[in-house]
Every structure is written in C-alpha cells, then in structure tokens.
Amino acid sequence: MTVYLHSLGCDKNLVDSEVMLGLLYEAGYKSAPDAAHADVIVVNTCGFIQEAVEEGIETILELSAHKEDQCKALLVTGCMAQRYRKEITAEIPEVDVILGAKDFPGIVEKVNALMGVECTLDTGHDSEDLVRETAPAVLDGDIYAKRARTMPMHVAYVKISDGCDNNCAYCTIPSIRGPYHDRAFESILSECECLVKGGAKELVLVAQDTARYGTKLYGRPRLHELLRAIDAIEELGWVRVMYAYPEHIYPELIDTIGKHDKICKYLDMPIQHSHDDVISRMGRKSTGAQLLELINRLREKGVAIRTTLIAGFPGETEEEYEHLRRFVADVCFDHLGVFAYSQEDGTPAAKMRPQIKALTKKLRRDELMALQAGIAENNSKVLIGRVLKIMVDGSVGEDGESIAYSGRSQRDAYEVDGAVFFSSPVEWMSGDFVNVRITKASGYDLYGELVRE
C-alpha cells in the first residue's frame, strides 16, 4: 500500500514528517508519487497562527477529495490537529484519524488499524502513552534514526529539543507542544553522524529555543558543547544554529561560534521588538539596551544575524513603533523578517487592549520590510569584489556552454535568506564548495564568477 505525506509549517514539523515517513516505510508502506495515487494520505499541519490554520484547512479539504478515488484513509497530525482536534472532528468528517503534535510516533499503529493490517512494529509507545500524549518520551528513543529524507541530501535539519517554557504573551506553542524538554546529547550526535554519512554537508540545528539546549536534561546550557562535537565530524561542511532566543545566548556559545570554522558565522535570534515597554508586555526578558549589547558582541565575532519582529503588538503606540523603526535602521540586520501581530485565542496578548487595527499592523510591517530591503541592498553591495566560499545548492539552468548554479555563503540559511548565482563549465554537485568572486548585487541575492584555484 502507498502513502503520501503533505508537510506544512516549519522545519521542525518537517523533521516530524520525515520520521513518520520513515516509520511507515519500515512497516512496509511505499511512497506514492502524488496524492492521487495514494492509499493513505497524511497531512502534518501547522497551527502557530491563524494564517497557518487556514492553510491547513484548505490543504485538508483539497486532499480529502482523493477519498473519492484511490485514497482509503486520511490522517491529520501536527500542531493544528493538536490545537483544534474537536473542531476538525466536528467539521471535517472526511478525516479518519487525528494525531496531535506529540502523537506522531504512533502513526504506524493508527494507519495499520485503518487499513486492517496487524501492527508488528515496536516504536516503544503503547496505546496508553498515545492517549496521554507524553511528549518527553518522543525525544528519548531512536526514532530519529528512521527518518526518510525528503529534502535535498546535502542539507538536513536536526531537532535538538521540543516544547517551550518561555511563555511569550503572543505565542501558542507552549499550549500546543507542551513544556520544554531536551533530546539526549548522544542521540543527537549519533543522528548527525548518520546524516553526514548519508551525504549531508550542512546540518541545521532547530528547536523552539536552541540556546536553552541542555538546561532541562543536564541542568546547564550545552549547545556550545554540542556544536563542538558536531564540528568534529570529519565529512561535515557546516553546522548552523536557528531559533536561539537572545535571553538564553551565553558567552561560551558566542565564543564557540566565533572560533570554529565549520560552525556558520550566523545566528537566527528572534527579538520581536526593541522598545522596553513592548518587550515587557510580550513577556520577554531582555531590554533594548541588552539586545543592542548582544548584537554588538556577536558582530565582534563576525556573526551575521537574522531576526524576526512583530509589528502592531497590542498597545503599540506610534512612539513605540518609531523606536522599533529607528532600531532597525541603526542596527542594519543582515536578515530580517517582520510579521503583523496575529491575535491568537488562548494567549494573554489576545486579551490585551487596545488591539491594533489590521490596516495599521499591515502598514507598519510593510514599512519595516521596505526599510530592510534597502539595508539588504546595501549589505549586498559591500560584498562586490570579495571572494566568498560558497556551498552549491544546485543548478538553475544553462548559460551558453556553462551551467548556472545557485549556492550560499555561511551568512545565508537554506531556503530562508539570499542566494549566490554563478556559472561554470565544470559540473558541480549539491554540497560542493567553490570560491566565487562577487561581481553584482541585486536585492537579497548576489552574482559572481567562479574563481579557479
């Protein structure tokens, strides 16, 4: 029997999707080329904000149409399923089984039950565990070694923890994913070694808050130790850190990123705002001055910084917004994403007053992104004439007798930031490293010529 899995949302969700596929393949299910030819369809949803929920509903309804053809079972899992289980059950009867965000290790038992197949696979989770949705146990086993890779083989995401205790006023994650819990150090390192043996050249560490790694399981932060251990993997090219909350970034981590060649001089660090009053209402622990000091320390080590901001948080005054706009203009982030605040049921911020009008939120977001576009253009132009070490991501066409390629420097995350384009008469594989002299900058992207050694 064949299975098709549609994964929505973040890269952490993608890891869960790959684990589910791996478990299903191990149990004897085959991959369907598309949803129309699948006996089983699985939708792994995102439920972080309302926009993601709407996308999930549209996707489920679209894929449910295949139940009139070959599909015999439709399963919905992930964050939206965890958050809106009752609503999905009541309003989308085409869905046969709903698995919450913490239930995914039980995918085989559920699919087998629907398909009338006796389950012989022991995942280490009995049915009572699945009912209770005991998340911590999910990270303790070896299920991550069973992942079926769906991304290009040269890049792999590695989930080092799950859940969150930060309890930001705007965020639904703690109520969906539960409290913060670490994954065992040895399990992560073993998976990293296996991924590199399988062809991964860049490992991207992800979690709700990567900088907290080790504090729950070991009683102290250990992300710097984990990075050093991963850096020692012989065939590895790069390791990158995403989603590190500024409140939990510590000196040893900064020093480690600065010292080791394989650790990308890059840090994704969501700050959300710069004004102390807004930061306080958000439930965050930093101040604007502390954020600026941290940014300067990172830049002293040559670290490129990506961050995210929320425009139009409840009560955001014109003065507070203007503070944020000036902060962006002064700091000149290497990479920046801005979101209009989303009022999410069940969060403290949803009850705050006044709520900012939708048009005002959109205008503030758009103004910040336009400001960042100019900053990015200037950041790119500074690199003209420099020779950068580039990881090849793949070919994008032909340029006469040459092949056109796209790639990235350490300062750009895969499918998140800008790209570097170049042509070469020599064929390169994804994950190869080349030197490129930058000759042109356009927006977020760079163009250059191959430098032959």
Image (tube, grey):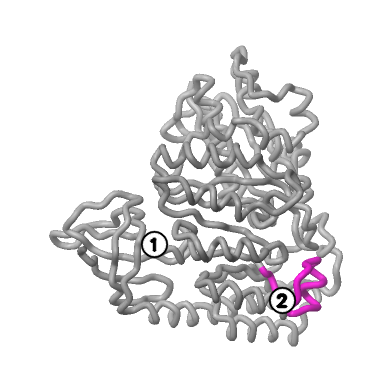
Q: Nearer the viewer, residue 31 or 115?
A: 31
- Quarter assignment of residue 94: top right
Residue 90 pos. (x, y %):
76, 37
Magenta segment includes 448: no
Residues rendered magenta in the picture: 271-287
Q: Kindly state the secondary structure of the residue where label 1 is placed.
A: strand
The numbered mark, 2 or 1, whose residue comes first in the sequence reads 2
Residue located beneath label 2 in the image: 290
**Is residue 280 found left or right of 103 in the rendered image?**
right
Q: Is residue 65 above or below residue 162?
A: above
Q: Is residue 344 above or below residue 14?
A: below
Label 1 environment density (alpha carbons within 10 Å; few <14, some 14–19, many ≥20): many
Magenta segment includes 273: yes
- Quarter assignment of residue 395: bottom left
Q: Which mark, residue 408?
A: 1
Can see residue 9?
A: no
